Amino acid sequence: MGNIQVRPSLGFSEAIKLAWSRKTEMKGRSRRSEFWWTYLGIYLSSIVLSLIPLIGWLISVVLAIFCIPLTVRRLHDSGRSGYWLLASVVLGFVVAGLFLGLLFSPENMSMMKAQGEEALVDIYLQAFTNVPILLGFLATFVLNIVILVFLCIDSNPEPNRYGDSPKYVIEDSAL
């Protein structure tokens, strides 16, 4: 094995430029610095954009969609598949569907018509005592913590099935 050289971390503007140039690319790997600086930029932009009704929200949603390929590439850099992110999204939609199904069930809708907004407290208590919803919330929470750990860990210097490391350069020591 050769000499391992570490490339310097990306700065804020470098990371955003690199992420933006690869905004639709799901293949390859992204460094932690590219990922976290870009997420910080998008988070701060979303805070500012929240001051503009509707248009700001729409732009924030578009920026969030552009984070999907970046997150997949970051998972690739840690040696994980992007399907981890897909599993989290699907599980989140399943739990939301279960919750909305309970909220808008015929029994609860008739209770809301009879009692008004006071019935919402009882409906929310039903949701938090519903075993499938609770297990779904717990599974989603645990899965998102696991993904967060994957996003935080450093990559291996060696190439993986997603490509060469963007952080490490392996120089051949053979003369």
Image: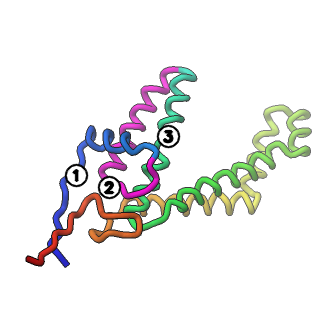
Residue drawn where x is 36% and y is 41% of the image: 21
Asked if the residue under mark 1 is in contact with the one under mark 2, i.e. CB atoms within 8 Å, the reply is: yes
- Which three-letter amino acid code belongs to the residue tagged 1? Ser
Please state the horizontal and vertical placement of residue 123, each as a whole percent of the image.
79, 45
* Relative vertical location of residue 160 with respect to residue 41 in this rendering, above or below: below
Which residue, as the protein is rendered here, is positioned at the far left?
175
Q: Residue furthest top?
A: 52
Span highlighted in magenta in the image: 25-52
Identify which amino acid the numbered label 2 is placed on.
Arg
Sequence-wise, the earlier of marks 2 and 3 is 2
Where does label 3 land, which residue? 64
Q: Badge 1 is on which residue?
A: 9
Residue 161 falls in which quadrant of the image?
bottom left
Labels 2 and 1: the sequence-earlier one: 1
List x then y, in percent, for residue 17: 31, 39
Helix, strand or loop status at disc 3: helix
- Residue at left offset 42%, top offset 62%: 76
Neighbor class of circle 1 (other Cα within 10 Å; few <14, some 14-19, many 20+) is few
